[in-house]
Amino acid sequence: MAHDFPEELKTLRATMDSVREVIDLPRLEAQIAELEQQASAPDLWDDPDQAQQVTSALSRANSEHDRVVEMDQRIDDVEVLVQMGQEENDAATIAEAEAELTKITKAVGELEVRTLLSGEYDEREAVVTIRAGAGGVDAADFAEMLMRMYLRWAERHGYPTKVMDTSYAEEAGLKSATFEVNVPYAFGNLSVEAGTHRLVRISPFDNQGRRQTSFAAVEVIPLIESDDTIDIPENELKIDVFRSSGPGGQSVNTTDSAVRMTHIPTGIVVSMQNEKSQIQNRAAALRVLQSRLLLQRKQEEDAKKKELAGDVKASWGDQMRSYVLHPYQMVKDLRTEYEVGNTSSVLDGDIDGFMEAGIRWRRGQDRASE
């Protein structure tokens, strides 16, 4: 299909105008200058944790600034390339411009999605918990498939992850698993993955080869930060210790290092077994519990606002995505209608399209309710 160069370039520039407005380049440049001043302090590394926060924040701010500036330059460059190709009637140059314009359009779309992540906790790192639902051993296997999908997604982007807890099912797969994605905006991106996922396939565990439908739940919460005010009185906690175990009940160690923490008022339970000591597992469990309570508090506040506005409808349906492997192959998001026929690619972590569609859909829902 032939490109309408003037119209496409005009659209790209308009999108970049809105991106710059949301990102607020002057504010970002002032933030970079302040962080550079802090980073150049001679006593910076006297406090390694603070130094790490400063250098990481500076790296993120510079990266965000450079992405916008470089994108503007790429749009200028492709416009020059188009003019050259048209003036000289050079098909090769025009083809090069078309290819670059396609890449830029995709990149600008991704940059625009980042500007839609403006929720209170969207900038946070994320804690993801996957639980097997209805469907027996197929559901446990599906939970493990989903965990691999998200870890592969993170790996594709170079995002560090940390598996915090895994509870293996007896025959195959996982009862549940919890892991962190330690990169800014992980929560904003992954939060649209929260909900019930459905798998339809010929069950590899059914000796009669029948089709099986199974379910798994995905929970995404923002990682707690040191300045968050979530105090949990000691008398509201019930803490049990037990031995960590691997697949099939194999002992990971011979000490009671795993921790199960129950928040008595809410009934929220968090288990941690992947750290080396009981103290580390207890600290990790407390951090995840605080994160869940933080999100719960935010959800209660949002629900109260909706109730006051006369709108008590839930934002998410019970089933948000279907993965169909038989009788045809398709992964379809039931909220956005976004779908992909290459199920293997999706289950191997190629889920950016689903996230982008989900983020845009959520922004549309938010605007409709305002």
Image (tube, rainbow, N blue to C red):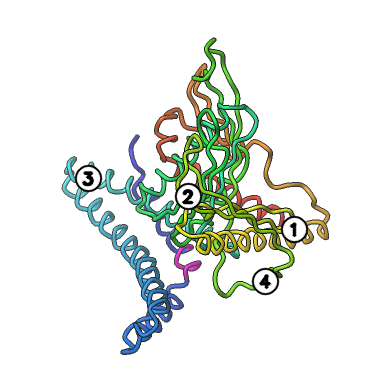
- Could you give the CA–CA distance between mark 2 and mark 3, rounded to whole angstroms? 62 Å
Q: Which residue does the numbered mark 4 point to in the structure image?
A: 231
Density class for disc 2 (Cα within 10 Å; few <14, some 14-19, many ≥20) is: few
Looking at the figure, which quarter contains the N terminus? top left
Q: Which of the marked residues, 2 or 3, is nearer the chain's N terminus? A: 3
Q: Is residue 184 above or below residue 92?
A: below
- Could you give the CA–CA distance between mark 4 and mark 2, rounded to whole angstroms? 33 Å
Q: Which of the marked residues, 3 or 1, is nearer the chain's N terminus? A: 3
Please state which of the two labelled residues, at mark 3 or mark 4, is closer to the viewer. Answer: 4
Residue under the image location 34 percent in, 51 percent down = 104
Density class for disc 4 (Cα within 10 Å; few <14, some 14-19, many ≥20) is: few
Mark 4 touching mark 1, by CB under 8 A? no
Determine the image quadrant of residue 276: bottom left
- Could you give the CA–CA distance between mark 3 and mark 1, rounded to whole angstroms? 63 Å
- Could you give the CA–CA distance between mark 3 and mark 4, rounded to whole angstroms? 58 Å
The answer to which of 98 and 353 lies nearer the viewer is: 353
Q: Amino acid at mark 4?
A: Asp
Please state which of the two labelled residues, at mark 4 or mark 1, is closer to the viewer. Answer: 1
Residue under the image location 44 percent in, 54 percent down = 162
The answer to which of 19 and 147 lies nearer the viewer is: 147
Q: Amino acid at mark 2?
A: Thr
Q: Is residue 243 above or below residue 247?
A: below
Q: Circle 3 sits in a helix, a strand or a loop, which is it?
A: helix
Q: Which residue does the numbered mark 3 point to in the structure image?
A: 96
Q: Which of the marked residues, 4 or 2, is nearer the chain's N terminus? A: 4
- Could you give the CA–CA distance between mark 4 and mark 1, rounded to whole angstroms? 14 Å
Q: Main secondary structure of the magenta part?
A: helix
The answer to which of 269 and 345 lies nearer the viewer is: 269
Q: Position of residue 232 (x, y in %)?
A: 69, 68
Q: Amino acid at mark 3?
A: Glu
Q: Which residue does the numbered mark 2 point to in the structure image?
A: 254
